[in-house]
Amino acid sequence: MSQDQTSGPRLKLNPIRCDAHGLCLQALPEMLKPDPWGYPVLTDAPVPPRLLAHARRAAAACPTLALKLE
């Protein structure tokens, strides 16, 4: 695996805090998909450099602070 696929910033979701407002889904549809109830589902993959600004906006848009970029 290349370093781009194993390292870099990652999105982390606190499912207890999430209220499924959907703002993150709108800001970053490339990495977040809704489950049947509208909650975001994400992978543990690092955020690609081309999507980093969008990932920051998605985390900032979360009204419950459930989504973080680490």
Image (spheres, grey):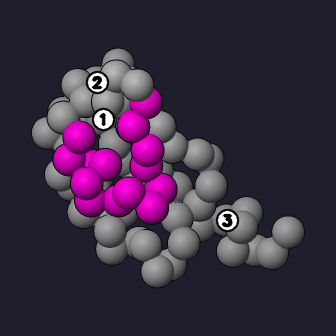
Q: Is residue 16 magenta-colored?
A: no
> What residue is shown at x 52% (from left), y 64% (from top)?
47
> What residue is shown at x 32% (from left), y 30% (from top)?
38
Q: Name the foreground residue: 3 vs 37.
A: 37
Q: Circle 3 is placed at which residue position?
A: 7
Which label is found at residue 66? 1
Is residue 70 among what the camera can see? no
Query: Mark 2 near mark 1, Cβ–Cβ under 8 Å?
Result: yes
- Residue 67 placement (x, y as % from top left): 34, 42
Q: Earlier in the sequence, mark 2 or mark 1?
A: 2
Q: Name the foreground residue: 70 vs 2.
A: 2
Q: Earlier in the sequence, mark 3 or mark 1?
A: 3
> What residue is shown at x 38% (from left), y 57% (from top)?
29
Q: Circle 2 is placed at which residue position?
A: 17
Q: Is residue 25 magenta-colored?
A: yes
Q: CA distance from mark 2 to mark 3?
A: 26 Å
Q: Please state the extent of the stretch shown in magenta in the rendering.
A: 22-35
Amino acid, disc 1: Ala
Above or below: residue 41 compared with residue 59: above
Query: Mark 2 near mark 3, Cβ–Cβ under 8 Å?
Result: no
Q: Name the foreground residue: 9 vs 27.
A: 27
